[in-house]
């Protein structure tokens, strides 16, 4: 079965999130960073470290989007997650590598580059606020819609 790029991306994201959960990491999808970039997955590890995972659907996606270097400043480890058909030799050696289909595996661990304490605190606060807001929206979508409408009318 041939999948479109969005279908491949969704499959890799789902499998990668499952891997994160299996490792005890708390994954959040589509996390806006302070530099205006958006991490595909930002995961909080049990040790308080952050893992940024950039999902690439195919080689064209990788070649067209070189913003991934800017994610390093907001995580302790940077990974690429790709599907089994991706040409792995094209990915940078100084990043971790996750290969996913229905399930995902880490083929190469990411080199550590620990965040400085002030940045870690800022990322932790952003992560916690986003997680809390998403949970509130899940539990009370009508209340969130009312709040958004009120904010828009100000």
Image (cartoon, helix red, strand yellow):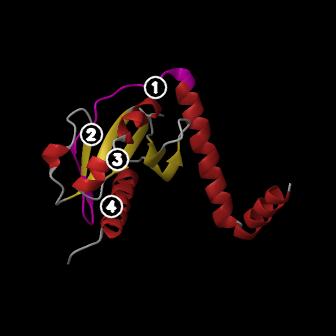
Q: Does 148 sit above or below residue 98?
A: below
**Mark 2 highlights which residue?**
96
Instruction: Tell me the distance, in whole angstroms, between the alpha carbons under discs 3 and 4.
Output: 22 Å
Q: Earlier in the sequence, mark 3 or mark 2?
A: 3
Instruction: Tell me the distance, in whole angstroms, between the alpha carbons under discs 2 and 4.
Output: 16 Å
Task: Name the residue rendered at 56%, 36% in the picture.
Answer: 34
Q: Does 92 sit above or below residue 41?
A: above
User: Along the horizontal axis of the image, is 135 left or right of 21?
Assistant: right
Secondary structure beneath label 3: loop
Give residue 15's mark.
4
**Mark 1 highlights which residue?**
115
Mark closer to the observer (3, 2): 3
Give residue 14's mark.
none
Q: Position of residue 121 (x, y in %)?
A: 58, 29
Q: Position of residue 120 (x, y in %)?
A: 53, 29
Q: Earlier in the sequence, mark 1 or mark 3?
A: 3
Q: Position of residue 145 (x, y in %)?
A: 74, 66
Give residue 65's mark.
3
Q: Earlier in the sequence, mark 2 or mark 1?
A: 2
Secondary structure beneath label 2: strand
Instruction: Tell me the distance, in whole angstroms, between the alpha carbons under discs 1 and 3.
Output: 24 Å
Q: Earlier in the sequence, mark 4 or mark 1?
A: 4
For the magenta stretch, what is the residue range? Answer: 99-118
Q: Quadrant of the C terminus?
A: bottom right
Instruction: Tell me the distance, in whole angstroms, between the alpha carbons under discs 2 and 1.
Output: 17 Å
Secondary structure beneath label 1: loop
User: Along the horizontal axis of the image, is 50 left or right of 16?
Assistant: right
Q: Does 7 sit above or below residue 111?
A: below
Q: Residues within 10 Å of mark 3 (few under 14, many from 20)?
A: few
Instruction: Decide which of 52, 59 is in the foreground and name it.
Output: 59
Residue 47 picture quarter: top left
């Amino acid at each position: 079965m041939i999948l479109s790029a969005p279908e491949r991306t969704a499959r890799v994201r789902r499998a990668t999130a499952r891997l994160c959960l299996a490792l005890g990491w708390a994954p959040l999808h589509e996390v806006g960073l302070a530099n205006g970039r958006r991490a595909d997955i930002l995961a909080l590890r049990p040790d308080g470290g952050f893992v940024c995972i950039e999902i690439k659907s195919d080689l064209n996606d990788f070649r067209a989007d070189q913003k991934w270097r800017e994610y390093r400043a907001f995580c302790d480890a940077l990974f690429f997650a790709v599907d089994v058909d991706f040409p792995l030799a094209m990915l940078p050696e100084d990043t971790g590598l996750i290969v996913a289909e229905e399930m995902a595996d880490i083929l190469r661990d990411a080199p550590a580059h620990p965040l400085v304490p002030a940045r870690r605190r800022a990322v932790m606060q952003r992560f916690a606020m986003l997680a809390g807001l998403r949970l509130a929206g899940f539990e009370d979508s009508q209340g969130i819609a009312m709040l958004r409408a009120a904010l828009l009318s100000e």
